[in-house]
Image (cartoon, grey):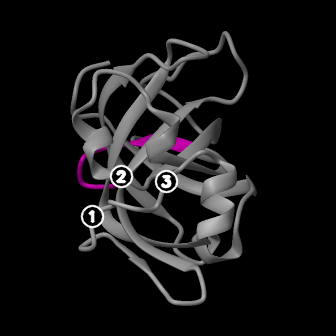
Amino acid sequence: MTAGPHVEITSFDVGPEELTDQLPVTARLLRMLPGPDRPDYALAVATRPLRFTSTVDALAAQGIPVAGLDPQCVHVETDGTVRATVFGLVMAPRIVGQALHPTMVDFPVALAVVIDPTQMRDPSIDFSKCSYVAVAFVTTVRSDGERDT
């Protein structure tokens, strides 16, 4: 899959209310990247920023270090709350063996938000830079955000 196809995240099967309130989200798929556990992750960029809230402890439990993250994207409050503005998304087919394709309609994917923007230039997925957030459903749309009929 080359850069350019757009998808719309239409809903979540399982996901945080904070992100559900921001749906639908349109994103442009940039490229496919291998991960440590499978070869079929897609890196995408949202057309508008998403607000993501977590805690230092929750991110640490996922192996995501908060120290050193870009302060323009991630703010750590004194109580340990982490507020991030994210554009980067990582998705993979929910069922191993299935593949993202040009005619997806409510296609289930595992979705992560990119906490560390350096992930956007990395050659493979680094789970210490991304936070898994949801099982989402995506539909392929045109670059103007409209679905093909």
Closer-to-camera residue (97/121): 121
Q: Nearer the viewer, mark 2 or mark 3?
A: 3
Q: Which residue is mark 3?
A: 65
> Please, what secondary structure does the residue beneath circle 2 have?
loop
On screen, residue 50 above or below 145: below
Q: Which mark is residue 62?
A: none
Residue 125, given in percent of the width and then of the height, sits at 43, 28
Query: On the image, numbered disc 2 is attached to which residue?
Result: 116
Image position, residue 126 (x, y; %): 45, 32
In the rendered structure, find residue 70 and report the number of the disc placed on it. 1
What crowding class fits label 2: few (fewer than 14 Cα within 10 Å), some (14-19), or many (20 or more)?
many
Considering depth in this image, is 31 or 56 the residue closer to the camera? 56
Q: Mark 2 and mark 1 in contact? Answer it, CB < 8 Å.
A: yes
Q: Secondary structure at mark 3?
A: loop
Q: Which tag, 2 or 1, sits closer to the chain's start?
A: 1
Q: Residue at x 65, y 48 (%)?
A: 62
**Residue 142 on the magenta segment:** yes
Label 1 neighbourhood size at 10 Å, few (<14), some (14-19), many (20+)? some
